[in-house]
Image (cartoon, rainbow, N blue to C red):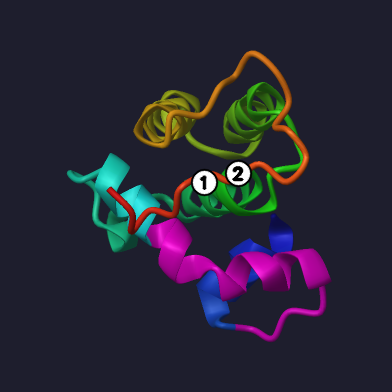
Amino acid sequence: MQAVFAYQMANQTVDDPQAQKVINSLNTIDDAIRQNAPKWPLEKINKVDLAILRCAIWEMLIEKTTPPKVIVDEAVELAKEFGTQSSSSFVNGVIGSIIKQFNISTDSPPAAGSQTPSPHEP
């Protein structure tokens, strides 16, 4: 998350391979955020919250190796620790909306090779 935060703050080169994967997927990730937080333009979202959302959404929609419930719990805890007083509820709300939009089950881990529709599919 720190490398994603540093990239979005100063457009710095990133040495962390996982963070680079998140950065390479920003168009898809940011589209999902825009669709699920329509009242919040990306430039108005707290930068810590945005880094948390970008990492969590990448894990959920693209990487798909961590159970969604774990991703949500970790994102909310990070928001509580590093964000503002309202960060955890904002992060939880956006991720919850994305879970509904993409019909992601939070009951069990994703099946190996499972496919979640891209944000550009209906």
Q: Position of residue 51 (x, y in %)?
A: 56, 54
Residue that appears at 53% across and 72% down: 9
Give the magenta part as a residue range.
12-30
Classify residue 106 by image quadrant: top right
Q: Are there few (<14), some (14-19), or many (20+) residues within 10 Å of tag 2?
A: many
Specify whether residue 29 is painted magenta.
Answer: yes
Three-letter amino acid code of the residue under disc 2? Ala
- Image check: 105 left or right of 50? right
Amino acid type assigned to the residue bearing label 1 in the image: Leu
The residue at the far top in this view is 107
Which percent across, then down, holds residue 119?
Answer: 38, 53
Q: Which mark is residue 5?
A: none
Q: Tell me where residue 100 sits by quadrant.
A: top left
| Image vertical order of residue 45 relative to residue 23, above or below | above
| Residue named by callout 1 | 53
* Image position, residue 31 (x, y; %): 34, 59
> How would you rate the neighbour count of disc 1 (Cα within 10 Å): few for under 14, some for 14-19, many for 20 or more?
many
x and y, in percent, of residue 72 in the image: 60, 27
